[in-house]
Amino acid sequence: MKVAGVVIWFLLLPLTARCVEPISMAFGTLITGVVTYYGLLWYSPDQCRLEGAINVTALQVEFEEKIFGQHLVKRVILKAVPKFLEHKNPKKPLVLSFHGWTGAGKNYVSQLVARHIYPLGLKSKHVHQFVATLHFPHASLIDAYKDQLQSWIRGNVSACERSIFIFDEVDKMQRGLMDSIKPYLDYYDQIGGVSYTKAIFIFLSNAGGEYISELALRFWKTGKKREDIKLSDVENHLSIHTFNSKDGGLWHSSLIEKNLIDFFVPFLPMEFEHVKMCVRAELRQRGFMADEDMVRTIANEMAYFPKEEKIYSDKGCKTVSAKIQYYL
């Protein structure tokens, strides 16, 4: 029946293409009826995802192949995201706050999550990314930014309940801006006739990066594995630090005060071995065999901290792609 539906659709397409304006409401209803009856909406490459679980195995494989040294991130994402998507009536949106230094993978993981829900990823009309220094640069325009942000979220969730919103550089957001979206993250069934409970909000921030690095270093110095670090070792501190950080966009934020952020996710600093993994993965993605001499050379060119121990890459894997391009 679906094949027949496709044939009918293509037979109708030349007629509809010649019409700049709808001929009548009846004709529009006819087209809608044909599309609905034959299930043609199934063929849309970017449908709003209302129900259904994601492929957790595929998500796990991508973590194994492309995300290195982030056992806490992996644990949270592989549990929290699928369970949220499976829940038919969540009480509130899923809110994740990613913390750590540049290059640890915050942006990549947020895009990975979006791509496993919507195959087009950031290109999907249901995935929306905001960058503090790009979209909200002027403190004098804070009131206008609040109105625009509320309007944007309201409009997009009205069109698709399962919208994804990614806020980058939250530590550089204008103070008070994030509080303007507090109602949409709270425990409300509806606000103005719109339900926000199936939306996903992801915050990316460098806030807490120093504490995360110090914690990892303490574990290293005492001979403990970084994999022994538990979410409970760091999550509460990240919450307190973010709330009290005067330079951050969540300073004294009601989002933290009202416990509306579900997970504070720490991204640990990348060690020498993790940088080499990044180099190998990038080479494979480009279709090259991993030349270990090149892998070691590129990893050695990175700057590492602390000054004495030189354990962690100060840029993570951020410049790996550019380095490879230079050597190829």
Image (cartoon, rainbow, N blue to C red):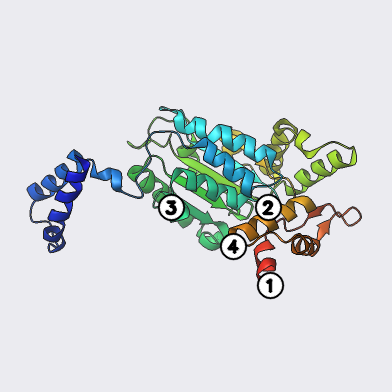
Upstream in sequence: badge 2 or badge 3:
3
- Quadrant for the C terminus in the image: bottom right
Lateral position of residue 263 relative to residue 33, left or right: right
Between residue 282 and residue 32, name the one nearer to us. Answer: 282
Instruction: Give the residue drawn at x 39%, y 52%.
Output: 125
Q: Callout 3: helix, strand or loop?
A: loop
Front position among marks 1 and 3:
1
The residue tagged 3 is 120
Distance from the alpha carbon under mark 2 to that under mark 3: 34 Å
Q: Position of residue 321 (x, y in %)?
A: 65, 64
Distance from the alpha carbon under mark 4 to that under mark 2: 39 Å
Q: Is residue 249 visible?
A: no
Front position among marks 2 and 3:
3
In the rendered image of this protein, does residue 12 appear above or below residue 230? below
Distance from the alpha carbon under mark 3 to that under mark 4: 21 Å
Upstream in sequence: badge 1 or badge 2:
2
| Picture disc at residue 286 | 4
Front position among marks 4 and 2:
4
Find out whether the residues at labels 2 and 3 contact each other: C-beta distance under 8 Å. no
The residue tagged 1 is 326
Residue type at tag 4: Arg
Distance from the alpha carbon under mark 1 to that under mark 3: 30 Å
Find out whether the residues at labels 1 and 3 contact each other: C-beta distance under 8 Å. no
Q: Callout 4: helix, strand or loop?
A: loop
